[in-house]
Image (spheres, coloured by chain):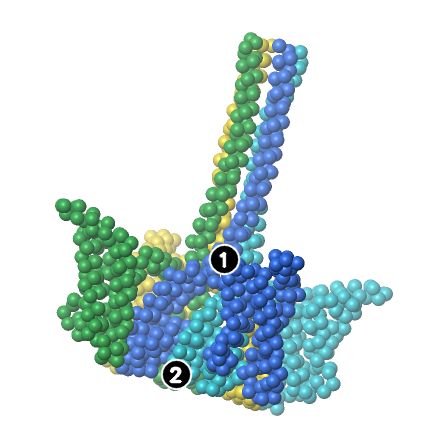
Chain colours: A cyan, B yellow, C green, D blue
């Protein structure tokens, strides 16, 4: 068997349901292993077995990636999902990677391979990402609103309540918290007790930011609904047009019939001439 | 009267509005009894009467179930609602059931018989359950996001804030709490004061999880709206098609009229020949 | 002028824009008076003037009601809004009404006369009330869910956390608070620290009740959207049908033309006979 | 070159993409400068450079405004956006403006020039403002509800919990906080522990105000959706009408054909006469 034949055989193997199923199962096992590794008491007792299973799942990932690289060649790198798969597996082989804390933590990103491997998850993620541009302008408006309000409250309230508004970073976080509606009254109360007019500032901020966030949510919802509506509408248009075509056909047939009648009349006259 | 006749008679009895009404009333009485039983002061004074009424409602439930089992025979077990009704009543007769705390608590599930007995509640519950599959993929995405973030925060912040991120379970609960938007800033503050970069992690988590939950909600809303829209659309298509049929009929009648005229002309010519 | 003539004159007076405007202005003045009356420092200084203005507004209300009663006669009592207007004004004349605390408080309900007097507010309130039946079944489901969960948590957690789950009333309130998503983790934490499995109960409750509330909201939204969609759809159907009628008219005219042509042919043949 | 020619040249200059881009970049630099000015440690080290850059951006703003004033003449003042641009720049030249705290703070409003300068932001802001009238009546209803409830709770609970309900202002803020769903149970608990019936008042307020806010949100969403739907519908109507026109054209052509046939018949008869 030559290389091209081998490639095709590997490609068919990769597309088999049982192969996909095995990879998904191994990702789930790997997720469980990484979960157990966070428990010191478990690792003290079953540490060796857990590490062994972890390495075994890694071997499966490497073999699967090698097969896909062999089958797809350079095309492999064209898909963002594939690049993602490659890097989350490659993390394990960065020198010192098992020691360094951050790289250790990044290993859990391998669980996100569920998103790249299961087809329906892939399309859900793609759909979520596709709606992001539609909210770009409103999200920018929210960021501008947060920044302007944060600079203002740092200058105005920084001395009064240094914990929440002491510097630009704290102010941004405090106002982001207010925007999510979480415990905003307690963030705002120390300042507003000192400067009663500050209530006006904060109630205004709550109303405006809630309104902007609401419109952000509505923009996402309208886009989702619109996709649905467009499908429904084109179905409806098809149905009405199909019915219209039937009516038109019936009318044209009747006219055709009439034409034949007139032609017969003409023929009769012609015959008489 | 033979068995078949008796079955039919019982079936008719069960479907009578007053029978249904009585069962619903008894479920409500039973609900009130179970409510009063939680009050020690009430039970100290009226305990015997309350227990007596409780046993009386149970007798009604058993009789009703026996009638339905007799009338429907083996078909009874085909409906999930019936199986549910059987088990919530059967709980009372598990040996030691009145003593054991958990079984005592499960008796309150009998109130849920309102959902299986009132027809409009049944269809609401069925509709709610029917929308669950449509959100499957996004719910799975949320679970994956929670799991990955929980493993990460256990490894990164477990030592800093053991109360919220000490083990995988605590982390999952803390992040679930953050996802519901409840008091998230207080969960996050101890950790973020120790590691300033942690704000980035948590703000990112809040934004992404809010976005996923929003899309979960939108998926449910779009499905509900779509059902409504489909009805509206088919009504609209029917109306347009009906109008179109009337137009077509008028046109075809005019052509038919013309045909008759041409036929008359033909007849005249034929007569002259 | 006889009584009927007087009634018509009064009816016309009541419908004048300046009369309506005056009543609305007096309601606003009355609202301000009731607001100032809550401030002890204001009442110490301007108490007499404020009371005087309050009594003057009351006189206006009585005169307006008397005019409306005279003009509309028995028909007055047919409208719920009118009955509401009558009672919020009548409160002031209940013996001891100015002394008793509760009746004093109820005077503020006069501000709600804005809802009955301003036409656009009336229709908004009517629209809000009209959507209530559509959510009846789901609201009932939420109430059943709250009741069942409250009985369960009273029995299971009453001893552990008497403040939140000590009796059925506290449990209902605590779970209502959890349902609104307000500070639920703090309500739940003392119990869940004692019984770790309680997290399962509460997370389940949060998920299910959020889902039911979401569906309650969606039911309201779908109803509002549906009203809008129906208008849009009937406009669209009208437009399409109008276009269709024009097409049909054009076709029928062409056929009519053809008929005249055939008739002319017939006449020519007849003339030749 | 005369004045008119100069005006046209300046107008073209202002509309160039690179000119717009430069202005946007300068606004962003100015935003960063105002951000850095809130940090004392940064200003201690780089204060002079930061101030210099701040003045430079101001010079750019003044030049840009002067060019636009020259190019547009009196028309400049007709657009609200232009007036806004003028005032946020003019703030810097109010005598004592650099010293006074409030005017210092207002300088950050210059960042909002991003909204007036970037075309897509301008249309987003215009769209947000356009939806405000549609929610006027429901917002008024919410304000009335808040005011009535605030007067009531001041009179009823002012003595019990002076912190939250001591005067009309506090009550309005506390109830606004309850309306946003933030920490409402803690606001309400001290009062409700003293007067158990107060739970009824507050739960009623939560349910009604949530319902009104929900309807406020739905009004905004329905308006946004309606704009989308109207576009979709008119597209759909166009498509159906185009198809209908094609059918009508085909039918009329067939009838025309028939007419020619009859005319030929007529001509033949005429020729024979």
The residue under the point 29% across, 76% down is D154
The residue under the point 58% across, 86% down is D43
In the rendered image, which residue does mark 1 sit on?
A: D225
Out of A134 and C179, give the one closest to the viewer: A134
- The quarter of the rendered structure image containing the C terminus of chain D is top right
Subunit of label 1: D
B45 left or right of B161?
A: left
User: Which of the 4 image quadrants contains residue C188?
Assistant: bottom left
Q: Position of residue A132 (x, y in %)?
A: 59, 66
Secondary element at tag 1? helix
Out of A116 and A182, give the one closest to the viewer: A182
User: Which of the 4 image quadrants contains residue B14?
Assistant: bottom left
Q: Which mark is residue B185?
A: none
How many numbered discs, if any? 2
Tell me, yes or no, whether dots 2 and 1 are on the same chain. no
Residue C208 seen in the figure: no
A256 left or right of B177?
A: right
Q: Position of residue C273 (x, y in %)?
A: 56, 8
CB atoms at circles 2 and 1 under 8 Å apart?
A: no
Q: Position of residue D226 (x, y in %)?
A: 48, 55
Secondary element at tag 2? helix
Q: Which mark is residue A193?
A: 2
Q: Nearer the viewer, mark 2 or mark 1?
A: 2
- The quarter of the rendered structure image containing the N terminus of chain D is bottom right
The residue under the point 56% across, 60% down is D72
The residue under the point 60% across, 69% down is D63
């Amino acid at each position: 068997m030559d290389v091209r034949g081998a490639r095709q055989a590997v490609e068919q193997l990769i597309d088999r349901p049982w192969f996909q199923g095995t990879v998904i199962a191994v990702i789930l096992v790997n997720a469980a292993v990484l979960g157990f590794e966070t428990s010191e008491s478990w690792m003290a007792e079953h540490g060796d077995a857990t590490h062994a299973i972890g390495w075994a799942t890694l071997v499966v990932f490497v073999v699967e990636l090698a097969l896909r690289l062999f089958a797809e060649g350079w095309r492999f790198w064209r898909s963002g999902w594939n690049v993602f798969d490659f890097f989350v597996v490659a993390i394990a082989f960065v020198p010192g990677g098992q020691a360094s804390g951050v790289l250790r933590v990044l290993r859990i990103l391998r669980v996100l391979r569920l998103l790249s491997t299961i087809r329906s998850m892939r399309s859900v993620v793609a759909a979520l990402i596709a709606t992001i541009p539609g909210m770009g302008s409103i999200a920018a408006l929210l960021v501008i609103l947060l920044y302007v309000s944060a600079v203002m409250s740092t200058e105005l309230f920084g001395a009064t309540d240094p914990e929440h508004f002491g510097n630009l970073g704290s102010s941004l976080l405090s106002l982001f918290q207010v925007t999510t509606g979480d415990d905003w009254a307690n963030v705002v109360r120390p300042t507003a007790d000192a400067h009663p007019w500050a209530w006006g500032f904060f109630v205004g901020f709550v109303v405006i930011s809630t309104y902007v966030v609401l419109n952000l949510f509505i923009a996402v919802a309208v886009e989702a609904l619109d996709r649905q509506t467009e499908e429904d509408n084109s179905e409806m248009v098809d149905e009405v047009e199909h019915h219209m075509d039937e009516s038109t056909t019936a009318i044209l047939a009747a006219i055709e019939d009439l034409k034949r009648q007139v032609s017969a009349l003409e023929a009769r006259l012609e015959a008489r001439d």
